[in-house]
Amino acid sequence: MNDSIDHPAIVRLRAELDAAWKGIGALAQLEDVPRDRVVAELRTAVPDVASRAAREVGSDAVVAEITRYAEAGAPESASAVPAAVIWCDVVQSASEAARAAR
């Protein structure tokens, strides 16, 4: 049994990834300026949480959790919002931050 999957840092990471996924799906409902702010926040907040989690439980467990979310694919979104590109950026940046936290 891997205790890291129930570690509070992994639980926080899951919550952040879930919120990011849902937030990306809702981006089409926002005007351009607020949308840009939300995207910027997602691109920094998720990697920050991933980095902190990696310092607590190790980068392998964090990258595995991020990969699990990444494999779920991007949320559905209006064609005006490049959800797949944003999601890919978020999970890639989070994985890089987790690996750098060693």
Image (cartoon, helix red, strand yellow):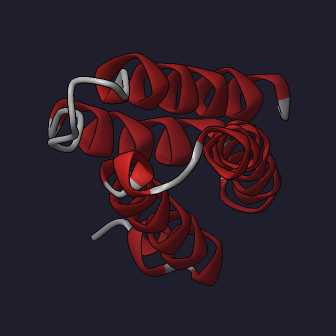
Q: At which x and y percent is residue 17?
A: 46, 57
Q: How many numbered marks have been drawn onto this rendered protein structure?
A: 0
Q: Residue at x 15, y 40 (%)?
A: 72
Q: Residue at x 36, y 65 (%)?
A: 2
Image quadrant assignment for residue 82: top left
Which is nearer the eye, 84 or 100? 84
Q: Quadrant of the N terminus?
A: bottom left
Vertical comparison of 2 with 46: above or below: below
Residue 37, position as x, y percentages in the image: 76, 46
**Quadrant where the C terminus lies?**
top right
Residue shown at 50%/54% (left/top)?
Answer: 30
In the displayed structure, does residue 64 sit left or right of residue 30? left
- Residue 25 in percent (x, y) is at 30, 51
Which corner quadrant of the image does residue 79 belong to?
top left
Question: Which residue in the rendered view is the most extreme toward the front?
Answer: 31
Q: Is residue 56 above or below residue 34?
A: below
Decide if residue 4 is on the left or right side of residue 54: left
| Relative image position of residue 28 (x, y in whole percent) | 36, 46
44 to the left or right of 87: right
Q: Is residue 43 above or below residue 84?
A: below
Q: Quadrant of residue 96?
A: top right
